[in-house]
Image: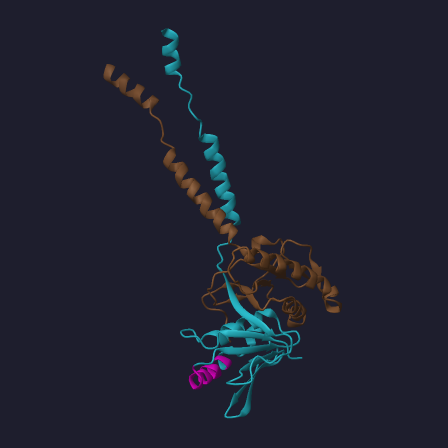
Chain colours: A brown, B cyan
Amino acid sequence: MRKRRRRLGEAQHGELTLAALIDVLVNILIFLLTLYGSDPGEASGAKVELADSTATDPVESSVVVVVTEGTVVVGAREPVPFDSLVEDTSALKTVLREEFDKEKADDASTLEEEPPPDLVLQVDRRVTWTQLRPVLAAANQVGFVDLRFVVTTVSDPATP
Amino acid sequence: MSLAKRRVRHVPQLNLVPMLDMMSLLIQVLLINVHFGAYAQIETQTSSMTGKDPGEEGLRLDVGIDEGGYTVSWSAEGRRLQRSFPCVDPTCAPEQYDRTAVRDLLVTLKSAAPDERRVVLSPKGNVPFEVMASTMDAVRTDGTSPLFPDIVMADRK
């Protein structure tokens, strides 16, 4: 009877070791937050339905331009509507030039000769060439030569 | 003495339960909202946006995309050759573009000029970006080996 009481008493004072559980949870949290950071769609608030592709090259960070059916968004700036782009691309060029100079200045701080910065384009799959053309022309005139189109990787896209 | 004993008995302990609650809730929210889709990039150049031809020698491969299908042109033995690949279906929806036929032609051209890497992509009119991206896939690789991975976007009105 005395022994039984002692056992019950020990069980009541037993503590759950939470350190291992917390370690696992912190690791999951870090993994999920990293995953969020690598999602190009999260960077801009614009709703973009990316095109499918078999490409597997990881997306590199650079100046990001989001092209949807109605607007063009450069980085975290105000959207530029397409209607104004057709008539005059000067507003877009100004914004692109600022981003180009900023990125170039960042590269210059590494003291190594860097090629001109790339432009990362998140283009909605429904955007037509007529809409995309002035954006690419403006980027080219500013000095962006290499373009990186962001796509969703699929193993086997629809083929005819 | 008795006071000292009491202090030893009441060692303050960190209550981790609220923190665990918060962390598990945070993980649930992140898991619900996370997009597990993999993103990738396709590298291209825009040197032809100024209207300047990217090259005068070699194959000078050009893939035109319009609202009726593809037009592939290239140079061979001093002549300019051209082939058209209309859409499989007259509606010419993005999935109706004959990418397989274009890729087959490009495989033949690649075997004739294995050192060539550049292709000029010339979309026109209201061709959606979806078609451009799938065309980039078709010209970049045949599935196992690279075809023409150096893609140049051109504006040919």
Q: Is A142 situated left or right of A156 in this image?
A: right
Residue at left offset 46%, top offset 45%: A30
The vertical placement of B96 against A14, above or below, is below
Residue placed furthest toward the front: A111
Residue A137 x, y percent position in the rendering: 65, 70
Judge whether residue A1 can be spotted in this image. Answer: no
Q: Is B153 situated left or right of A85 in this image?
A: left
Judge whether residue A87 can be spotted in this image. Answer: yes
Residue at left offset 67%, top offset 67%: A138
* Number of marks in the rendered image: 0
Question: Where on the picture, by quarter, is residue B54?
Answer: bottom right
Residue at left offset 48%, top offset 31%: B18
The vertical placement of A148 against B25, above or below, is below
Q: Quadrant of the N terminus of chain A?
A: top left
- Extent of the magenta region: B102-114
The vertical placement of A127 against A75, above or below, is below
The vertical placement of B135 against A47, above or below, is below
Taking the magenta stretch, the answer to whether it contains residue A18 is no
Residue A103 x, y percent position in the rendering: 59, 58
Q: Is B137 situated left or right of A2 in this image?
A: right
Question: Where on the picture, by quarter, is residue A134?
Answer: bottom right
- The front one of A119 and A97 is A97
Residue A159 x, y percent position in the rendering: 50, 74
Taking the magenta stretch, the answer to whether it contains residue B109 is yes
Residue at left offset 39%, top offset 8%: B3
Residue B127 x, y percent position in the rendering: 62, 74
Q: Which secondary structure is most common in the magenta stretch?
A: helix
- The front one of B58 and A103 is A103
